[in-house]
Amino acid sequence: MNAVPPGGTIGILGGGQLGRMLALAAARLGLKTHIYSPETDAPAFQVSTALTCAAFDDKAALENFAAACDVVTFEFENVPARTVDIIAASRPMFPSAATLAVTQDRFEEKSFVASLGLKTAPFRKVDGGKDVDVPAPSILKTRRFGYDGKGQAKVANATDLARAFESFRRAPCILEGFVDFEFEASMIAARGRDGAIAAYDPPENIHQDHILRRSIVPSRLTEAQSGEAKAIAKKIADALDYVGVLAVELFVTKDALLVNEIAPRVHNSGHWTIEACLTSQFEQHIRAVAGWPLGDPARHSDAVMDNLIGAETDDWRALAAGGGALHLYGKSESRPGRKMGHVTYLKAMTAAR
């Protein structure tokens, strides 16, 4: 499979802020992008070379889209399997349909991670809301289509579980034991078509109302823990024969690193790499799916990335004067809990580091 040369076109399924930043990174490398999204006001449409606004089940639109691209990727993992099948029939698709089959289902994902000998919270599948032994406390999550705290509820007993299960409209679920962690971290890593791995320094992540609020680099992970986190990401990526950037979300306990979730895409906790690294996670993903050599992920600055959520971007003048690297996503409407942008603050690393 030949690499996509400058002037070639990368197809991106999904038109949110991740697609937007992927398109901007591709342009820097002389590559075109074609965004496919059902949303008429998709933020990525504003910066892409070409666009298709159509439903994910529109076979004719998908085939025309694929024909206009050299390779196709996605900016969110909940792409319908049928959509992927239509694209993959005529164009290379990275990450693969097999990867999506694992990562779109929380139970399958946890089972896959455990099969690699990696540590997770205790878990079991839940297909009914009654007669389930519930360790207190636990987290009930829908197996599919959950993000930013959606599709999950804390439960302490069987009554709580039954109530939560009904609120999820009896969708298949997974019950996870609560983890007493010290903090959360993530590992952002890229794997090329040739199997090469490039991993970033793992950020420490702070969440509020289940939404990422801040990522900090360097994190409190020790050098040994950082090495372990990179080994975990490599083990997962190699087992999936992965191509592109993936994120592994981690719980850091006193004794271990536990895998919480895998995100088969560029990730919110890696946005700081745009300013603080030689090669951002977005450029790295484009390089990987296009078949280019991976870039250097070295970090040249300490960084703090803050998400801008809901109405926090309304006073954009103050943000623009705030001294950080400001990114606004071009979304037409701010809503509570909606990610509207982010800002990254840099500090040069000390000579001691």
Image (cartoon, grey):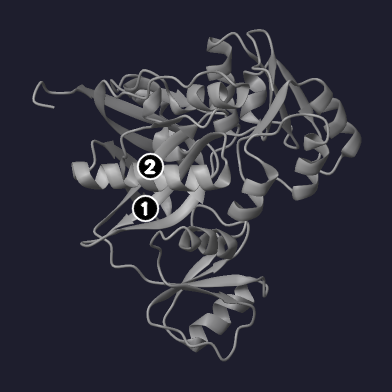
Of the image marks 1 and 2, the number of the one nearer the N terminus: 2
Q: Which residue is mark 1?
A: 250
- For residue 314, which numbered disc appears in the image? none
Residue closest to the eye, 283 or 224: 224
Residue 85 image offset from top left, x and y in percent: 80, 43
Residue 12 image offset from top left, x and y in percent: 67, 29
Q: Are marks 1 and 2 in contact (CB under 8 Å)?
A: yes
Left or right, 207 with respect to 54, comes to left
Q: Residue furthest bottom?
A: 131
User: In percent of the image, x 54 and y 21: which residue is there?
Assistant: 287
Residue 2 image offset from top left, x and y in percent: 68, 18
| Amino acid type indicated by mark 1 | Leu
For the N terminus, the image quarter is top right
Res. 277 visible in picture? yes
Residue 341 image offset from top left, x and y in percent: 46, 32
- Above or below for 188 versus 240: above
User: In percent of the image, x 88 and y 38: which residue is there?
Assistant: 59
| Amino acid type indicated by mark 2 | Met
Circle 2 packing at 10 Å, graded few (<14), some (14-19), many (20+), is many
Residue closest to the eye, 329 or 244: 244
Q: Quadrant of residue 202?
A: top left
For the C terminus, the image quarter is top left
Res. 338 visible in picture? no
Q: Residue furthest left?
A: 352
Left or right, 60 with respect to 40, comes to right
- For residue 187, which numbered disc appears in the image? 2
